[in-house]
Amino acid sequence: MVTQELNLVEWVNHKAYSLRRWSIIAPAQAGSGHPTSCLSAADIVAVLFFYAMHFDPYNYENPDNDRFILSKGHAAPLLYAAWHELGLITDEEMLSYRQFNSDLEGHPTRRFKYAETATGSLGIGLSVGAGEALCAKLDKRNYRTYVLMGDSESSEGSVWEAVQLAAHYKLNNLIGIIDVNNLGQSTETMLDYNITRYVEIFSAFGWQVFDVDGHDIQALMNLFDKAREIKDKPVMIIAKTIKGYGVHHVAGLQGFHGKAFTGEKAQEALKELEQKFPDAVHYHDDFERKPKHPQKSIAAYTGATTIIEIPISAYKMGDMIATRKAYGVALAQLGDSCDAIVSLDAEVKNSTYAEIFEDLHPERFFQCFIAEQNMVGMGVGFDCRKKIPFISTFSSFFSRAYDQIRMAAIGQVALRLVGSHCGVSIGQDGPSQMGLEDIALMRCLPNSIVLYPCDAVSTHKLVEQMARYSDGISYLRTTRMETPVLYKNDEEFPIGGCKVLRRSENDVACIVAAGVTLHEALKAYEILKQRNVFISVIDLYSIKPLDAATIISVAKSSKNRIITVEDHYPEGGIGEAVRSAVKNENIIIQSLAVRQLPRSGKPEELLAFEGIDADAIVGAVQNL
């Protein structure tokens, strides 16, 4: 037994050396990278992959596999090297690191099939891990989620949002590791090597905390065994390391972050590794240990229903229903039909109406409190584990989590974001609560879709469409105020479509609007009709993708004039989307949008103040 344990330690040491070696070779070949950040964490990663984690590397999608998230994504060569040592990446692929056609990018993305998600913007990994750990609890799975973080990123506020929530939910299946090498990119870290302070802080937040020499293989192995035994709280391991460990002329020194060893420097670094770890270099024992296979979850969740459909709504034309409430009803019905649907809400469930879902499906509703960054990161974790997350808060507050949203888009994550309380039409709460830039923020994301329903029926249908969309971020904008139902319940709302609600042979302009301003456009139509002036009206419920062909066709028969009307700032909103879509068509476009700093007031006062109400539309048409 003693011999076997000794062989195991020597074998893991050999793997750590191999990880370090490739962490020098791959960046040297690329001419760029972060080798010193890899060298500090190589022993931790070696122990995780070749001792601590229970997983089948040859069946990555095994639902009981332990999961690993590299939050310090700049140390990507370590991740790639670990899978290389498992025999799943070739030498040639390792040498393609950072090349255009390679899946081994400078920071991991989902192009690399063994990455849980895209990382690199720091402070995000622990939130993703919390989502995965909650998913394991929901599905009654045994797997644990390991998150490797850097000490510099522990300054990020999103980390502490995740720390609090993980303790709140008692996520004993979440194990974080902080690689404390005390050197950031340009200066020493805030806490330097004050290991005691790290322990005190995380302990105060309700975590089980251990500290360890991050270069002591045996100590790391013992500690990861102990971490798996904790029953009632998440675990944080504070690992004291040396940046550049193994290469003497850079070890522990500032000024080498993000600098690859190239040419003779690379050869010198490799020779230093050989001198530092001679036993690991010359390890030729026959001993080899396969990763511990995961324990099959006996009472595990058997798999989500894949049919995504909801019953036809029961709204009546003319009924006054807020689209935010129609969202809550539709989401709850989705939860009835598909058990992969989960809801995350930022402590505004009675405003977003996510509480309707919670009442019917409490086990799949997750209160994230007022911590939007962590909420979005958790949604990424749920998506990683095959769930369909709907994430709701006020539209204005998604801007707080935009980094997480941007990284989710880079990671090709299918998040469904629902922003309520958009625009000045929310009224007296004032400008801090008004989402007026959200369309712009969501439009610019790769593969995103942006939807803005005007009534309960279209909301109902579009929520169903969002659940089916899995190619990227989908965003639904909902309204605080009640608006009348315009459509019959059997009306269809395909993504990328629009609805022509008014049209004649005598139209002098085409009004393109969505949400609240669509109702203002219809009011303007009636006013102008009384004056024997006719306009066409388009409901642009799908802002991205946008039905350019229909808009162009209607505009051509409306004297080549378009007036866009939106409860949003002009930059990046509906007006700019339409203008881009109809370019080179010889169409005159005027945009009515929120151009003054809003204030508190009644919705009708604010719509008039910003020049986006029915009277403003009438005036714009007459001025043509």
Image (spheres, helix red, strand yellow):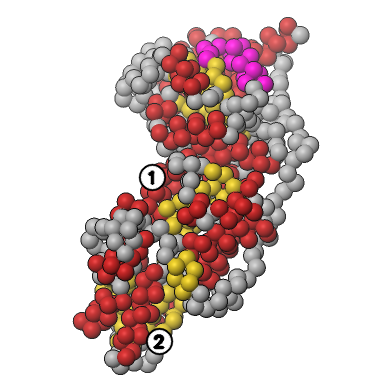
x then y, percent, for residue 246: 47, 14
**Quarter in which the N terminus is drawn:** top right
x then y, percent, for residue 208: 56, 21
Query: Does residue 1 sit above or below 565 in this rendering?
Result: above
Pick the residue in front: 301 or 170: 170
Query: Does residue 22 sit above or below 312 in this rendering?
Result: above
Q: Residues within 10 Å of mark 2 (few under 14, many from 20)?
A: some
Q: Which residues are magenta?
A: 211-229
Q: Residues within 10 Å of mark 1 (few under 14, many from 20)?
A: few
* Secondary structure type for disc 2: loop
Picture residue at 41% right of the left edge, 68% below the top = 515
Query: Does residue 454 sit above or below 599 in this rendering?
Result: below
| Residue bearing the label numbered 1 | 400
**With 54 as the anchor, is 487 left or right in this view?**
left
* Secondary structure type for disc 1: helix
Q: CA distance from mark 2 to mark 1?
A: 41 Å
Q: Earlier in the sequence, mark 2 or mark 1?
A: 1
Whether residue 458 is in magenta: the answer is no
State the image quarter where residue 537 is shown: bottom left
Picture residue at 67% right of the left edge, 21% below the top = 229
x then y, percent, for residue 277: 54, 11
Q: Is residue 116 visible?
A: no
**Quarter in which the C terminus is drawn:** bottom left
**With 216 as the anchor, is 249 left or right in this view?**
left
Pick the residue in front: 487 or 492: 487
Tell me the amino acid under the disc marked 2. Answer: Arg
Mark 2 near mark 1, Cβ–Cβ under 8 Å?
Answer: no
Q: Is residue 299 visible?
A: yes
| Residue bearing the label numbered 2 | 503
Number of numbered discs present? 2
